């Protein structure tokens, strides 16, 4: 589904030949956010429950447990490149967050904030150049992340998207 | 909290290794509170008016631009998350259409 959401976002952002209509830019931002949101949830659920077709119903049920706020808090930590001491305690001293994970985490935060502005703040005015760049960043960072070989850093990031508040609050 | 000298220093263009395209004209920061209530920064990157769509959709250049800004802030000890917005000069002055 996330591919279709990204295609839809790009179609909306480039639909108007002249001055873009705000409604199209707003919906483009919202679609792009949900593309990342669902892609990351799907990836995490595949990791936790398996990727086979018969496991899909279980993935879809688990997917309902993810929240925007928890994902944002986890991504803020990962995008910044360092985890708070209570989380990092016990991890190998050599642990570091790969740049491709930092970039993707930052993109989720950026899009989530824009999505909130797009859906709830009538005073916000969206710029076509900003939206076009954001859509491309979303696609690039997501493709790069999904093509990364399986690694403990990648798995840890994904699981943190679901568990961050409990983990960081200890 | 007003934008302090550390932030201004971190955003000084001559100290940033920005990609050649899109050409950056100015970088300004303002205090911001995001939708979850966290204090943050809203950063306006004004880019050249002649920047093409293709340059905006070269994801790697924009990713590098934003990463450079974020890392510069982190290196100065600024932990506030930077929400980085691009704009052309003409988009700064444009008025909303009727909706």
Image (tube, coloured by chain):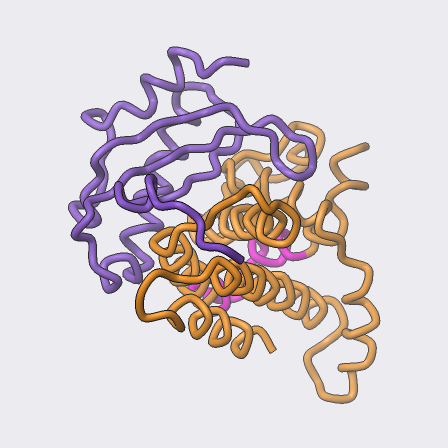
Q: Report x, y in % for residue A4.
A: 54, 79
Expressed as whole percent of the image width and height from the top left, the position of residue A46 reads 69, 72
Chain identifier for the orange-coloured part of the image? A
Q: Overall secondary structure of the magenta stretch?
A: helix
User: Which residue occupies 60% across, 30% down?
Assistant: B33
The region drawn magenta spans A144-158
Q: Left or right: where does residue A120 sit relative to residue A170?
A: left
Residue in front for this viewpoint, A85 or A136:
A136
Q: Nearer the viewer, residue B94 or A100?
A: B94
Quarter of the view holding residue A84? top right
Classify the position of the C terminus of chain A by image quarter.
Answer: top right
Q: In this image, B18 relative to B3: left or right?
A: left
Question: Where the N terminus of chain A falls, by quadrant?
Answer: bottom right
Q: In the rendered view, does A27 fall on the left or right side of A169?
A: left
Residue A47: give x, y in percent of width and height: 68, 68
| Quadrant housing residue B29 | top left
Q: Residue at x 57, y 66 (%)?
A: A31
């Amino acid at each position: 589904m996330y591919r279709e959401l990204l295609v839809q976002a790009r179609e909306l952002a480039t639909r108007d030949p002249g001055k873009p209509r705000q409604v199209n830019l707003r919906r483009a931002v919202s679609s792009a956010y949900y593309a990342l949101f669902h892609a990351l949830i799907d990836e995490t659920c595949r990791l936790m429950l398996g990727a086979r077709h018969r496991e899909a119903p279980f993935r879809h049920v688990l997917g309902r447990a993810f929240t925007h706020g928890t994902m944002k808090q986890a991504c803020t930590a990962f995008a910044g490149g360092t985890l708070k001491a209570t989380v990092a305690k016990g991890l190998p001293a050599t642990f570091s967050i790969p740049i491709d994970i930092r970039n993707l985490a930052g993109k989720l935060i950026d899009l989530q904030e824009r999505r909130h502005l797009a859906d709830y703040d009538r005073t916000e005015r969206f710029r076509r150049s900003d939206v076009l760049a954001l859509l491309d960043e979303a696609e690039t960072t997501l493709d790069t992340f999904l093509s990364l070989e399986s690694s403990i850093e990648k798995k840890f990031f994904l699981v943190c998207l679901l568990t961050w508040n409990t983990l960081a609050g200890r | 909290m007003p934008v302090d000298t550390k932030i201004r220093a971190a955003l000084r263009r001559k100290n940033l290794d920005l990609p050649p395209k899109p050409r950056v004209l100015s970088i300004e920061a303002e205090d911001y509170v995001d939708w979850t209530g966290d204090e943050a920064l809203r950063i306006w990157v004004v880019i050249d008016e002649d920047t093409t769509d293709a340059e905006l959709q070269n994801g790697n250049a924009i990713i590098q631009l934003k990463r450079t800004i974020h890392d510069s802030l982190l290196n100065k000890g600024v932990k506030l998350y930077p929400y980085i917005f691009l704009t052309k000069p003409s988009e700064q002055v444009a008025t909303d259409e009727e909706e």
